[in-house]
Amino acid sequence: MGARTVCYSVSEPNDSHRRALLRWQVLTSIQSLRRFNQSIQVKVCWLGAVDVNFELNLRQLGAQIIACERYDEILVDFPGGDLLNQYPVLHKYFTVARAADPDCSQILLVDCDTVFLSDVGQLFDKYNEKDVVASPEVGSRRGPVPYDPTYLDEDKLSAAAATLGAQFIPPFNSGVMLLNRRSIGAMRQLGEEVVKLTLRLMVGIALSEAEVLQQPLAALRVRLASRSAELQEVKPLPHPSSNHWIIEEVALWLAFGMQGLSVGDFTTSDAVLGGGVFAKPRMESDWIVGHYFSANTESFKRWLLDHAVIPFEHSCSKHTERLPVDPALRASPLIAEHSGYAVYEGLIDSVAFGKLAVEARDQFWEASEQFLRTGKGGDGRGGHPPRRMVHSGGGPTQKKIYQSASMRHFLEDLCRVQVCPTGQRGSFNYYTRAGDFIGLHLDVLQCDLVVVTVLQDFSDPHSAAGAFRLFPNHLGVPLREIGSECDRAAVTLKLMPGQSLVMFGGLVPHQVLPVQAGQARVISALCYRAGYS
């Protein structure tokens, strides 16, 4: 078996907002991939100037950046290249060849607007027979929604293929494509053919009577019409879709047909498109990769922040003794609706997260061991649970996050109570040796609310090693009442890097289960007072 690679291709836009969005999308996608697969090779082909901080973020995620020439430089030798430069999606068919090592057998070429919910290696194992594997295009006969020939006319597509002497390729979405050895070898020639066919389709649009709604393409149509003499040697092709943003995909299907390459489909249990990403809450979704489409970015961000709601059940304790609970906190939506905790993805943005992970590694050298064989100090808050771990104070990056108004406002909006930091900085906890843990406890008196973010973990996401174990059904129950018979009521949460737990740590009994050898789990902890007057 040859090398396997996940490849992204990004053309640096001039617009600063668009540039920031693309970087966020790339980092978020790779972070999600790395939660389930730490070893697969990831390469990012970046066209244009490479930002030093962005490259550092990628390296922290184990990704290699490949600096490429600008998009317009790739197209300069093609007829109408300056026009095609206005359509910034063709570069990936050229750059993917640069990501292929000599022994490369499979490349998963993915767009930036993707997310992973399971081990990407499963796709490479399962789909290795066809030259390329992808999801059926939305609106096609095989797609996830009913076929709509006014959107994508497959009969017209078949006729265009016949005109070129090509076999008909059933339409597929190019946002997630698994290329196997034969298609990898053909990519350079395919890239050139896709560019030529895209121009022919654009000229076909310019000469047609079809309405063009997208403003950039409408402007491009005017420019094409004004240069008809210059482009008269370009043979127009009729575009078989009312969506003019998929010109490049149509060109790709035709180019594949001209090369005689075989195409297979991902199942919807492995890959989903568009609204299919949001069909279920994130915690209930079980596919491998989703391509959410950039137009749905805000919906994607809301979906990322989805968290599990654990139904409140009666305590398994046989006793009725209760510790005092502030009525304002008990009425908080975080308790009333979510049993005292919530899990979030991307609460700390990808750039800040990268800096925080670096800071945690730096602070490790100033850390000290905490070891207590037997817990002491009572049944409630302020006790000293058994533990073995390494602990350090935070640094300036963590302090900035901790003291930020945006974090405080987020927590106050979530909890509907006043919130303020308990001190000047948070802390880092390092569970780096087999057996490191912290026993069942409630957080100290000043730490009503805690935000815990996992910065590093090299273990299997499905393993309970290093996981948080919560007892949300035991708010106000003395710790001594939570025995082994309560295990069935416990909630085990295995957060992975980039995920954050927001919890009323002074109310929800919790512990950190022992880590395994080589796991190296590192967390950031921020403590807040809540509900004070």
Image (cartoon, rainbow, N blue to C red):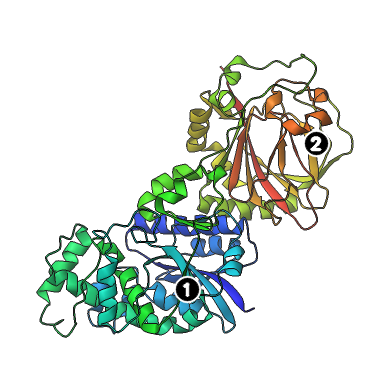
Q: Looking at the picture, does residue 333 appear above or below residue 221?
A: above
Residue 431 seen from this side: yes
Q: Nearer the viewer, residue 371 or 274?
A: 274
Residue that mark 1 sits on: 132
Name the residue located 76 percent from the left edge and 14 percent from the top edge: 320
Name the residue located 21 percent from the left edge and 64 percent from the top edge: 217
The alpha-carbon separation of the residues under discs 1 and 2 comes to: 50 Å
Q: Secondary structure at mark 2?
A: strand
* Residue 393 locus on image (x, y percent): 69, 43
Q: Looking at the picture, does residue 327 appear above or below residue 310?
A: above
Which comes sooner in the sequence, label 1 or label 2?
A: 1
* Residue 305 locus on image (x, y percent): 51, 41
Q: Residues within 10 Å of mark 2 (few under 14, many from 20)?
A: many
* Residue 226 locus on image (x, y percent): 10, 73
Q: Quadrant of the N terminus?
A: bottom right
Residue that mark 2 sits on: 439
Q: Residues within 10 Å of mark 1 (few under 14, many from 20)?
A: many
* Residue 285 locus on image (x, y percent): 54, 47
